Amino acid sequence: MNKKTIIITAVSAFVVGVVLTGVIGFVSMPGLMMLEDKSPYDFDTTVEAFEHAVAEGGWSVLQVHDMQETLAGHGHDIDAVKIYELCSSKYSAEILALDDERIVSPLMPCRVSIYEKSDGSAYIGRMNSDLMARPFGGVIAEVMQVAAVETEEVISQVLNGDVQVTEAR
């Protein structure tokens, strides 16, 4: 092979590698950005266990959006979905106290969704906050990653059955 053929082959391989990496990243990104776990409980028990674990973990529930109820009011029939807005004041304050860091306030508060699928099973879904925090760097990444760990600990308690709940309904 001559030098020109080697260079063309190397550049072509590099371009194909970059394109292939981009395609793989694009296809797998939704699965990386969002997390979903099947609950060992039914929907109502999962909700009860989650609310208890959140309180025990020192977090606050700022708002609960009952999407099934809301959409029923508009003539839509969907399975149960509750979206929780969670807040830990210590983490929120660290980010919101700094002018340059307030840019991430649209990602706040942390949201966790509990929903039922057509098979009747309950699931807990949320954004992969740890992954989403990394590109920001600095205080934002540090705070969001610590908050993500605590949120995952709360969810793990529910998934592992470590929360005292009343009888399954």
Image (tube, grey):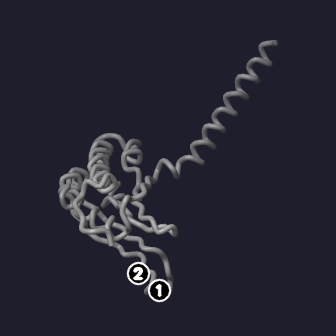
What residue do we see at 63% from left, 35% from top?
Answer: 18
The disc labelled 1 sits on which kind of residue?
A: His
Horizontal placement of 107 versus 157: left or right?
right
Q: Position of residue 120 (x, y in %)?
A: 47, 69
- Name which quarter of the figure residue 36 lies in: bottom left
Q: Residue furthest front?
A: 167
Do we see residue 89 in this rendering?
no
The disc labelled 2 sits on which kind of residue?
A: Thr
Q: Position of residue 62 (x, y in %)?
A: 25, 68
Image mark for residue 74 = 1
Residue under circle 2?
Answer: 70
Q: Position of residue 46 (x, y in %)?
A: 33, 64
Identify which residue, 62 or 57, lies in the foreground: 57
Q: How many marks?
A: 2
Q: Position of residue 68 (x, y in %)?
A: 42, 78
| Quadrant of image for the C terminus | bottom left
Horizontal placement of 107 versus 24: left or right?
left
Do we see residue 12 in this rendering?
yes
- Asked if residue 72 is positioned above or below residue 66 in the image, the reply reads below
What residue do we see at 32% from left, 50% from top?
Answer: 152
Q: Are discs 1 and 2 less than 8 Å apart at CB?
A: yes
Q: CA distance from mark 1 to mark 2?
A: 7 Å
